[in-house]
Amino acid sequence: MPAEGFFDPDHRQLYTDLLRPPEGYRFEDAIATTYSLDFETALVIPTSIVFRDAENREEMLANPMALLEGVERMAGRLAIYCDRGMIKGARPDAARLMALYENTITEVSAPGGGAFHPKIWCVRFRSDTPDDFVRMRLGILSRNLTSDRSWDLCLCLDGVVGSTANPSNAPLERLLRKLPELANVATRPTAPVFLPALLKDLQRCHWELPLGATRVAFSVNGLGGDTWSLPKGERLAILSPFVSDQALTALRDGVPEENPCHLIARSEELDCLSPEVLGRFSVHTLDERATENDGEDNEARPSVELEGLHAKAYVVERRQRLQISIGSANATTPALLPQTAHKSNIEVMASLEGPISRMGGIDNVLFSESFSKLLAEYVPSDPPVNDDIRVAKRLLEKLRYEIARLALELHCREEGDLVCLTLVSAGQALPIALPDNVTCSIRPLTHENTVGFDANAFLQGESASLDLGELALGELTRWLGLGLRHEPSGTQLHFTLGARLIGLPEGRDAAVLRAMIANSENFFRYLSLLLGTLGEGIFGTESTGEGQWARQLGRPGSSLLEPLVRALCQGGPELEQIDRLLQRLEDPTGGASIVPSEFLELWESFVPFVKTNNKKKKGRTR
């Protein structure tokens, strides 16, 4: 891609493209970081890895069997870290499936008291040929792991793991190594098993540079040590949705005052800046008319729907060289000036550098014709007439931050077929000072009580525990839904927190699996996913009917018999996976099986071969 295309809104990349293996390679494992997260988007990720033809988010979310298979296969091969308190509220059906995925997501906090804000993906791929090099892919993003449709940026680098170290990767390695320690010490989960091997390969990975760049450098703010150096040069352009006077002043001081500096930010943020700081920049915003899509053909409009600016980039010209820095850091004090900020964020930045003769300059890289169409001159807004809602939102955000610092434990107690849940605070957490006009509710995300249980007395230390009702074993999850409400204004804030499960009954994962599959129709669909027989129609929602599946079971050319025989002949893992599935679907109470008897009769013919293959594999590992 030419350098001027880097900020071209017509050059799109799907989020899931980061996880697509190169030709002849397969996905091995990955670590991701994000500030905020929603469960629906997190569920799409493993599904898109397993089913490479899946690109439509809505189609994937409409097929719970495909989501279930994706989560099952990717368990233990993905690790996602997000800022504690920044998981969005979720529907009960998504939360139920996330019970199988809950060890994949770890909530962490920045040691400097600010936001855990980096957005990266570090992915490993292995070749189908054993002697080939391991390949890696690095994504440095401004986008969170959510369904947000804002205009974002991503730098995607492919690399090969060699025999020599690459010192430029040291900041990334330090960040990834530190991640498990950033979780609350009282409820900290174990680090991913694959993390040491991934870090070892990252140390020796050498990246293919794009855009005519001659070097790339990585920086991490908020963990001590070296931080991202503010760009200094003859010209500077800043692309940042959020801004502050102090950070912009520090950035502007790096450029001679007689040279223009460009600033592109959100209008509501620009309204909060001092006139003195604004006067030192040429200021633009995204033109709302240019980012709206009215459904009519119009060549002057971009081909994508945009809903506001979220991208962060710093472009500087210095001595006939161009530097493009992108990543998570806004032009704010907690992000860029951690040494002076009351609270400092964890941020990650990547800087590409090369000669202007090859990369271009600010005028044709950032202010290209296609991107300039999205810009408008900044016009100050009228001050808000009523600021009560804004004040209420700030209050609820402050309370969210304080509640998210708590280490929560969810104690389980079996009573018959149900599990009673009690929430307690682990460690020495101080009571939360809730104002009289604010209420807080907490509920297990899968509980039928969607209003939640009154948590004010618990959070204020007046009660040592909070009864959260009872759930069936297949509904049990560590995820809690919290709701804050400012009564005078009606302002509400909903978010999700994870608790550590204490006394989790055995067989929970199998119970979730049984609850998700639920009937023989879904069993056959899931079986087809295991065998890879649904092809491009995998994400369709049209049902063929339970009886039709059974009638096709043993016929020549049926949708299941032939792939079962093919799996047997090829010696792959499918038959072992089916055998394990059948064991997990057995009802421990002796209830009726969701697996049709016709299939069990057919499966008896394959059982001896499964046992034989298991013996062979055990013999090879001795």
Image (tube, rainbow, N blue to C red):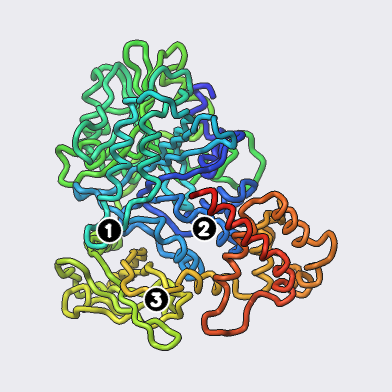
Quadrant in the picture for residue 266: top left
Q: Which labelled disc corresponds to residue 71? A: 2
Q: For the point 27% across and 49% down, which residue is it? A: 115
How many marks do you count on the picture? 3
Q: How crowded is mark 1: few (under 14 residues within 10 Å), some or many (20 or more)?
A: some
Q: Which of marks 1 and 2 is nearer the N terminus?
A: 2
Q: Horizontal and vertical percent for residue 221?
A: 25, 37
Question: In which quarter of the view is residue 161 placed?
Answer: top left
CA distance separating discs 3 and 1:
20 Å
Q: As displayed, is residue 546 above or below residue 286?
A: below
**Left or right, 568 with reference to 427:** right
Residue 528 percent across, percent down from the top left: 68, 60
**362 shown above or below 79:** above
What residue sits right under mark 3 in the picture?
505
Residue projecting furthest to the right: 556
Instruction: Name the secondary structure under disc 3.
Output: loop
Mark 3 near mark 2, Cβ–Cβ under 8 Å?
Answer: no
Give the alpha-carbon distance from disc 3 to disc 2, as whole Å: 21 Å
Of residue 55 and residue 422, the one placed in the foreground of this image is 422
Residue drawn at (74%, 53%), measured in percent from left and top? 566
Q: Is mark 1 on a helix, strand or loop?
A: loop
Q: Is residue 389 visible?
A: yes
Instruction: Tell me where residue 52 appears, x and y as whole percent.
Output: 62, 46
Q: How far apart are marks 1 and 2 (CA)?
A: 22 Å
Furthest residue to the bottom?
416
Label 2 Cα neighbours within 10 Å, binned few <14 / some 14-19 / many ≥20: many
Near-viewer residue (212 or 392):
212
The residue beneath circle 1 is 188
Image quadrant where residue 419 sits: bottom left
Question: Given the image, on which type of amino acid does mark 2 rest?
Answer: Val
Quick one: SS at disc 2?
Answer: helix
